[in-house]
Amino acid sequence: MKFGFDIDDTLIDLRAYAFALYNKKLGKNITIDAFQALQRVEIHELFGLTDTEGSAMWNSSLEEIYFMDCPIFEQALETLQTLNQQGHDIYYITSRPKQYCAQSQQWMRAQGFPIKEGHFFCGMQDAEKVAIIKNLALDVYVDDKPAVLETLQDIETKVILKNQSYNEHVTLPRLHHWHEFDNIIKV
Ligand SMILES: [Mg+2]
C-alpha cells in the first residue's frame, strides 16, 4: 500500500516544542494547560504577540524549531519503520518552506525515518498537497491541519486526522496516539 504523512504535528511534536522554546526565549512561563486549550495552530497569542510579531518570531526561530531536538510522537517512528519493513511505500508531504527542504529531509533521515528517493515532497502550499496526494494515488494520508484536511474531502485516499486541540471540529477518523494506527487503517 501507499502511505503518506505530513511531518509537523503529525509525526513530530513541533508546535509543543516551539511553545517551550518561546517560553525560554521570551522569559515567560506560560502553562502547558493554556497551550493545550489553544484553538488555532499559531501559538504566538499566548505570548501577547500580534499576528505580525508572531509570524516574525516564528520565521526567525525556524532553524532552531526544525533542526535541534524536536521530539517525535511516541510510536510514530516505529510505525513507519514497520510499514517500510513490510514493503509498503512511504511518502512525506510537508509544506515547510522551500529553503528548509533539503535539511529537513536530512534531519528526518538522521532520526531514522525511512525515506526513499523521490518520496519526500516539500515546499508546497497547504492547498497544493491535495494534487500530490491524488497523483500519488495514496491509500492512506495522515495530517493535522484543518486547512489541509478541508481540501481532502472528495478523494479516494483514506484521510486520517492526527488529533490536536485546533482540529476538534473536524470529523475524520482520529488518531490520538500512534499505537492506534494499525487499527484505524483496518476499519
Ligand atoms: Mg502538520
Image (cartoon, grey):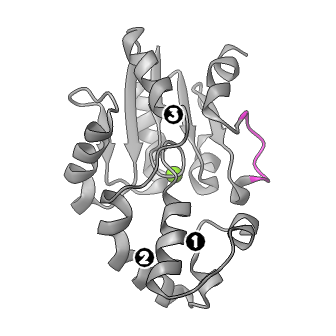
- 115 left or right of 147 in image: left
Q: Which residues are magenta?
A: 168-174
Q: Residue at x 40, y 84 (%)?
A: 56
Magenta stretch: residue 169 in it?
yes
Q: Amino acid at mark 2?
A: Trp
Name above or below for residue 52 compared with residue 19.
below
Identify the mark at residue 58; answer none if there is no mark: 2
Foreground tag (1 vs 3): 3
Mark 2 Cβ inside 8 Å of ligand 1: no
Magenta stretch, main secondary structure class = loop
Tag 1 residue: 42
Name above or below for residue 171 compared with residue 2.
below
Q: What SS does tag 1 mark? A: loop
Q: Quadrant of the C terminus?
A: top right
Q: Quadrant of residue 133?
A: top left
Name above or below for residue 173 compared with residue 139.
below
- 162 left or right of 59 in image: right
Q: Amino acid at mark 1?
A: Glu
- How many angstroms separate mark 1 from mark 2 (CA)? 9 Å
Q: Position of residue 40 (x, y in %)?
A: 66, 68
Question: In the image shown, does 182 or 133 lie closer to the viewer?
Answer: 182
> Given contact means CB atoms under 8 Å apart, are the residues at marks 1 and 2 in contact?
yes
Q: Quadrant of residue 47?
A: bottom right
**Mark 1: few/some/many CA within 10 Å (<14, 14-19, 20+):** some
Foreground tag (2 vs 3): 3
Tag 3 residue: 76
Q: Amino acid at mark 3?
A: Ala
Q: Position of residue 138 (x, y in %)?
A: 47, 24
Sequence order check: which comes first, mark 1 or mark 2?
1
Q: Residue at x 69, y 46 (%)?
A: 163
Sequence order check: which comes first, mark 2 or mark 3?
2
